[in-house]
């Protein structure tokens, strides 16, 4: 168990399914998918034409133009999510506490669009005329820095880039900072953008799902096989010590009981094949939380359509949960919003909302996680149910795995 | 667990002045500057054409060619330094459980060098770009490469906060050991020169055209460098049980944000001061105990002045008697690896009792009036030292290292 009690007091969510926490949750409950043919850039030369783009994000509704004018899309999403999360938590940032509130973010690749724009300006204009105002937001830590600047958060500030496990890694460091008394609260977030250059590059290394669609791809038809479907979004949560006195009307979506990271040895660009390290992370997280597998009411999956990953998840679930694993509702948010660096944080937020609202979003049923064309997933419709403990699992290519255990806060 | 329980048992370095720890330290003490013309790419059109490039390194004399065939230059630098650090700490021969060994590395731009070659080919449209050039692009590639090559199964993370990445990685590694989440952590960072970064700092006009000359009156800016600094951090109890004496103790670290501006530091130096003061609080070390500061010292007119202000704010009149030096004057600004290589200089200063110099300091800036150990290193018996890293975006990290007392060594 985390050595001190930790609670999530605020959530901010922006992704292709919804701009804002409530919209996302409602859309998820209505079993809507955001995965559809890409409209933002030309995909005719690519092996795939689908992704999960955010279409209705207007930075003006969140922050003044003078602040966002030179920010990348990724940074704008990050700041917007942080505004929603901080407002939701009710935390008031002042000179008294700003140095004790950290900002820890995760992103897979930073702003690929801004980086590409800068590099193309160099190629087009030559070394003496590359656009200087494009350069600052090419660094992956730009979103966390802008979030800190916007809110005047002067506590610890860092950014994690661990491919599709970046959000979980950011969360793990936030826990570490709180445990070591280096902060009282941390705005933990993740932000990733879907750009033309990223999509093209993922296609070049055959990481995209080779699929061309005319319309939206329903989660039940989500094929397991090669490649994933990229998405974009930002998720932010305010994680704070629950043992410190607070004058404000406290909101708590739940408590973070444990988080464990474990690695597998894999070939570059691949996932763990047998799920051993993921199972190890799950067992360690359960042990740290002083819980049994039978205590878990709901699981947030890392499933993203890559068969290698989904097989590993299935094997790890079987190994840890035994024959009961099929009965536990399993939620795959990436089937609705695509894959991105901080999608694990979104999965954690989804499980927190489930615990808080006592509502199971559309969940996978049946013996196997993997689906395929002609072998569709069976999804159970959303339903009300009292939930107490949730698990979130995640893995990334390269070999990282994570498991976290969240519990409903019974005091609120 | 006592904060003094985390020690450094292995050091690996690769940079412009040395391709291993000993040659790096020897060159540093002999005031050798690794800055010269850059030829990794065509730098002829830039305002500044100099850098601290790692030259004549044959990676595959030490690294397995087959497993490293799709690695980028940043990854290879990291693997090279990790190999040295792990051999020093005798990690493989000690039979430690791999689940208890973590890897936390910083990387500024990761495989941008290879990514930009891909992008240039795509832009020019003359040849079909090689997709394998994209494989090293993720900033975590070096972290994964080190963990996968050596079979470490503990927690792994890659930190990308520009110039403070690898210093924060070392701090996080210490946290992982303090909290019992790992017994051993391989930490540090790697960075390779890339045209994109070179062009970026040139476009901001924050580069020096002559050399890197921190705290000098005529300094113009930073000079980019490349390299890697990798450490083995471990619980002292375990190291002693295996007869590993260690180089220094990781006493603690401070991490904070300026929350002021993306490219300019807080003009009052508050962020830098807080970084140092929080580090000392975290390390439970009084201000009076600090004997040496390895400065961030980029050579940029604003940064050096503000770091000086911050040191004065924290240490008061004592600031004038604390030696402060900038290793960047010898190895350039290695961005994602800077914090780690400079930490190596700090640790070796404690270990050998020698202060590394600030090179190219010919005429001190009147607003930079501390003891910067100009141009020549000197012996000094130091017990506690700080290493500052202040990054783009206002991300500040300060590490605190302490000398391992003789009685604490393996009996």
Image (cartoon, grey):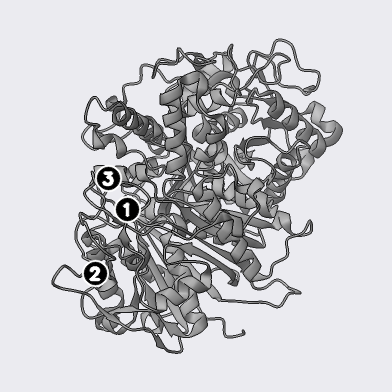
Binning the other alpha carbons within 10 Å of mark 3 as few (below 14), some (14 to 19) or many (20 upward) gives some
Q: CA distance from mark 3 to mark 1?
A: 8 Å
Reading the chain from its start, which is encountered first: label 3 or label 2? 3
Q: Specify the label residue A399 is tagged with.
A: 1
Q: Quadrant of residue A365?
A: bottom left
Of A257 and A348, which appears nearest the observer? A348
Q: Specify the label residue B344 is tagged with.
A: none
Q: Chain of mark 1?
A: A
Residue B357 location (% of width, % of height): 64, 19
The mark tally for this picture is: 3
Residue A322 location (% of width, % of height): 26, 79
Residue A112 location (% of width, % of height): 42, 42
Q: Which residue is mark 2?
A: A315
Q: Which residue is mark 3?
A: A268
Reading the chain from its start, which is encountered first: label 2 or label 1? 2
Of A334 and A166, which appears nearest the observer? A334
Work out whether residue B193 can be spotted.
no
Q: Residue at x 54, y 32 (%)?
A: B338
């Amino acid at each position: 168990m985390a050595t001190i009690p930790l609670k999530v007091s605020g959530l901010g969510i922006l992704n292709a399914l919804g701009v804002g926490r409530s919209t996302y949750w409602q859309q998820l409950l209505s079993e809507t998918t955001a995965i559809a043919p890409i409209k933002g850039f030309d995909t005719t030369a690519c092996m795939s034409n689908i992704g999960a783009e955010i279409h209705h994000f207007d930075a003006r509704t969140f922050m003044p133009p003078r602040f966002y004018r030179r920010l990348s899309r990724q940074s704008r999403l990050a700041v917007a999510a942080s505004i929603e999360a901080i407002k939701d938590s009710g935390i008031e940032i002042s000179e008294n506490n700003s140095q004790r509130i950290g900002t820890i973010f995760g992103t897979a690749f930073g702003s690929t669009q801004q980086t590409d724009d800068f590099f193309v300006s160099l190629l087009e204009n030559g070394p003496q005329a590359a656009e200087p105002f494009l350069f600052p937001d090419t660094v992956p830590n730009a979103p966390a820095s802008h979030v800190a600047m916007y809110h005047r958060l002067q506590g610890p500030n860092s950014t994690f880039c661990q491919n599709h496990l970046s959000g979980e890694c950011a969360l793990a460091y936030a826990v570490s900072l709180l445990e070591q008394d280096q902060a009282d609260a941390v705005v933990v977030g993740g932000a990733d953008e879907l750009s033309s250059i990223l999509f093209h590059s993922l296609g070049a290394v055959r990481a995209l799902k080779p699929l061309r669609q005319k319309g939206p791809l329903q989660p039940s038809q989500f094929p397991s096989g090669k490649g994933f479907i990229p998405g974009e979004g930002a998720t932010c949560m305010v994680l704070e010590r629950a043992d410190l006195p607070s004058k404000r009307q406290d909101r708590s979506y739940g408590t973070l009981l444990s988080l464990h990271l474990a690695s597998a040895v894999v070939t570059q660009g691949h996932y763990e094949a047998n799920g051993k390290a993921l199972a190890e992370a799950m067992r360690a997280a359960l042990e740290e939380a002083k819980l049994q597998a039978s205590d878990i009411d709901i699981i947030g999956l890392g499933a993203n359509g890559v068969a290698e990953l989904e097989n590993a998840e299935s094997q790890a679930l079987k190994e840890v949960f035994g024959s009961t694993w099929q009965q536990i509702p399993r939620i795959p948010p990436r089937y609705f919003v695509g894959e991105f660096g901080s999608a694990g944080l979104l999965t954690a937020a989804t499980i927190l909302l489930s615990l808080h609202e006592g509502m199971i979003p559309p969940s996978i049923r049946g013996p196997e996680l993997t689906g395929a064309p002609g072998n569709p997933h069976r999804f159970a419709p959303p339903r009300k149910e009292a939930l107490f403990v949730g698990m979130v699992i995640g893995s990334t290519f390269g070999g990282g795995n994570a498991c976290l255990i969240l519990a409903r806060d019974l005091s609120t | 667990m006592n904060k003094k329980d985390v020690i450094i048992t292995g050091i690996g370095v690769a940079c412009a002045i040395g391709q291993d720890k000993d040659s790096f330290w020897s060159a540093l003490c002999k005031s050798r500057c690794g800055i010269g013309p850059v030829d990794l790419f065509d730098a002829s059109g830039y305002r500044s054409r100099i850098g601290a490039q790692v030259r004549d390194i044959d990676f595959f004399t030490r690294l397995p060619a087959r497993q490293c065939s799709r690695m980028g230059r940043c990854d290879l630098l990291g693997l090279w330094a990790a190999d040295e650090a792990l051999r020093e700490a005798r990690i493989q021969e000690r039979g430690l459980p791999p689940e208890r060994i973590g890897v936390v590395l910083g990387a500024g731009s990761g495989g941008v060098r290879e990514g930009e070659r891909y992008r240039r080919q795509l832009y020019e449209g003359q040849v079909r770009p090689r997709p394998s050039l994209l494989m090293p692009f993720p900033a975590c590639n070096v972290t994964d490469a080190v963990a996968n090559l050596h079979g470490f199964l503990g927690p792994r993370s890659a930190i990308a906060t520009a110039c403070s990445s690898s210093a924060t990685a070392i701090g996080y590694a210490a946290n992982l050991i303090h909290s019992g989440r790992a017994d051993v952590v391989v930490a540090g960072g790697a960075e390779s020169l890339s045209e994109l970064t070179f062009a970026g700092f040139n476009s901001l006009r924050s580069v020096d055209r002559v050399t890197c000359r921190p705290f000098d009156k005529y300094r113009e800016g930073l000079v980019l460098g490349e390299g890697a600094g990798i450490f083995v951090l471990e619980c002292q109890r375990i190291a002693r049980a295996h007869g590993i004496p260690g180089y220094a103790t990781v006493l603690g670290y401070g991490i904070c944000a300026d929350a002021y501006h993306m490219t300019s530091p807080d003009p009052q130096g508050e962020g830098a001061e807080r970084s140092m003061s929080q580090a000392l609080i975290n390390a439970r070390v009084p201000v009076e105990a600090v004997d040496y500061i390895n400065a961030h010292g980029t050579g940029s007119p604003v940064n050096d002045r503000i770091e000086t202000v911050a040191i004065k704010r924290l240490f008061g009149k004592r600031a004038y008697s604390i030696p402060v030096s900038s290793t960047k004057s010898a190895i350039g600004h290695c961005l994602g690896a800077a914090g780690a290589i400079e930490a190596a200089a700090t640790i070796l200063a404690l270990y050998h009792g020698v202060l590394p110099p600030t090179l190219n300091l010919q005429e001190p800036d009147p607003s930079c009036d501390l003891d910067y150990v100009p141009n020549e290193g000197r012996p000094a018996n130091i017990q506690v030292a700080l290493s500052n890293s202040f990054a783009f975006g206002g991300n500040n990290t300060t590490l605190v290292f302490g000398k391992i007392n003789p009685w604490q060594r393996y009996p």
